[in-house]
């Protein structure tokens, strides 16, 4: 009986297939107790042929996806076909030591835990041969995920979990960080254990991690944290902000030239611009993530963020001009940039956060 299934995503890993499967099938495990499902995303280097050569000899299955290549999508496709009640996910490049599979599955197979994470960042765990920038990126990724899930290595690609949990992963989840999705979907109720592993960088083939994967990860983290941060919302927010500046300036001039006092002109033009900005942001900038109803509570939050950003702007200006002695005509630019960032993040996380479970 198949107790657990090892799901391995591959993209151009031909040279790694034989050593990986040799090491997996040399483990001190009953051969019929596990299966290996390799999910390939259109490798052009002969990976599928290498896997097919194993299909007749061992409990190995090849799944060839035809969709757009995606790590999370591949793992979910493999999990959907798994016969075992426990699923182990690992990379094909031997950076995850196959010899740690028994230690990883034990706490899930015995029912004491729902998820076991192969962790590089607990005592006994390590990374070997990884360039410094990858070590930093990995640490940073884990650190940023910390508020969302209480594990030391949230970006690990080596983990085991109960098969049913695959259904909890959000449909729109993409990219490298399926473990994070799994942990966040569990909403803190999963019994999670970390098992130390020694990660060693691949010696054959190349990593497929790109800048766009890292950006996707960052965006996903922010969405999971409840924010509506994206290139689309940011650029629309910027357009609305510039429009608001025009409204503010024109109204201010008009009021001043029609005899309004400075205080009245200043307050009226500020409120008019804030109201226009709020309406446009609600109806347009954040419309995809948000119902778009105008609400007083939301408007007051929008104003709160605006006032906070204004105070911050004063603080930044004071710091740059008085402490760092930067001329005021230069200091205004970083101050405006800081205000824009605060305004945008405040809007994305506080005024127009994600309304439904991502
Ligand atoms: N099917 C499929 N589709 N497989 C993919 C894809 C894809 O789009 N992209 C990558 N893979 C496979 C690779 O062939 C490899 O087996 C595994 O996924 C990991 O990909 P790498 O590109 O080698 O990842 P890495 O070594 O740079 O990244 C390591 O560190 C990350 C950050 O901690 C891995 O341990 C990752 O799992 C980990 O998330």
Image (cartoon, rainbow, N blue to C red):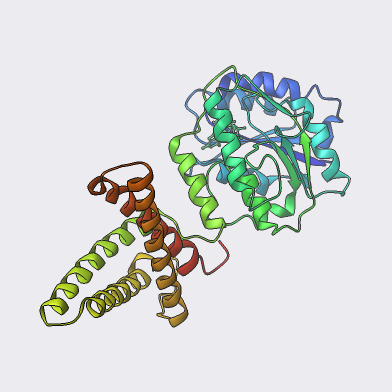
Count of numbered badges drawn on the protein: 0
Is there any visible trace of residue 76 in the rendered image? no
**Does residue 167 lie above or below 117 as drawn?**
below
Q: Residue at x 71, y 54 (%)?
A: 165
96 left or right, relative to 270:
right
Is there any visible trace of residue 241 in the rendered image? yes
Q: Quadrant of the C terminus?
A: bottom right
Instruction: Measuring from the top left, give residue 24's x and y in whole percent.
Output: 75, 25
Instruction: Measuring from the top left, give residue 92's x and y in whole percent.
Output: 63, 28
Instruction: Measuring from the top left, give residue 169's x and y in whole percent.
Output: 63, 54
Q: Quadrant of the N terminus?
A: top right
Q: Residue at x 73, y 36 (%)?
A: 118
**Does residue 163 lie above or below 153 as drawn?**
below
Instruction: Measuring from the top left, give residue 49's x and y in whole percent.
Output: 57, 25
186 left or right, relative to 112:
left
**Does residue 130 lie above or below 91 as drawn?**
above
């Amino acid at each position: 009986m198949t107790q657990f299934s090892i799901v391995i995503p591959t993209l151009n890993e031909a040279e790694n297939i034989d050593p990986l499967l040799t090491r997996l099938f040399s483990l001190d495990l009953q051969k019929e107790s596990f299966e290996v499902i390799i999910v390939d995303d259109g490798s052009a280097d002969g990976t599928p042929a290498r896997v097919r050569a194993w299909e007749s000899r061992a409990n190995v299955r090849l799944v060839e996806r035809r969709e757009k290549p995606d790590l999370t999508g591949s793992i979910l496709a493999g999990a959907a076909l798994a016969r075992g009640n426990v699923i182990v996910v690992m990379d094909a490049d031997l950076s995850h030591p196959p010899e740690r599979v028994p230690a990883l599955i034990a706490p899930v197979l015995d029912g004491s835990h729902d998820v076991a994470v192969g962790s590089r960042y607990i005592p006994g765990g390590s990374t070997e041969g990884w360039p410094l920038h990858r070590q930093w990126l990995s640490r940073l990724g884990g650190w940023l995920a910390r508020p969302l899930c209480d594990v030391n290595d949230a970006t690990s690609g080596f983990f085991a979990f109960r098969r049913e949990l695959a259904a909890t992963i959000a449909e729109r989840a993409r990219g490298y960080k399926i473990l994070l999705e799994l942990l966040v979907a569990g909403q803190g109720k999963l019994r999670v254990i970390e098992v130390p592993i020694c990660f060693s960088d691949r010696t054959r083939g190349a990593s497929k991690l790109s800048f766009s994967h890292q950006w996707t990860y960052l965006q996903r983290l922010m969405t999971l944290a409840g924010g509506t941060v994206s290139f689309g919302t940011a650029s629309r927010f910027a357009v609305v902000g510039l429009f608001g500046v025009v409204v503010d300036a024109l109204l201010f001039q008009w009021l001043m030239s029609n005899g309004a006092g400075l205080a009245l002109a200043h307050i009226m033009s500020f409120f008019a611009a804030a109201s226009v900005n709020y309406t446009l942001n609600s109806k347009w900038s954040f419309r995809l993530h948000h119902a778009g109803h105008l609400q007083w509570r939301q408007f007051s939050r929008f104003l709160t963020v605006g006032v906070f950003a204004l105070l911050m702007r004063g603080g930044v200006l004071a710091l740059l001009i008085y402490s760092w002695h930067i001329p005021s005509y230069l200091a205004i630019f970083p101050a405006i940039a800081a205000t824009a960032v605060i305004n945008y993040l405040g809007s994305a996380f506080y005024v127009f956060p994600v309304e439904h479970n991502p």
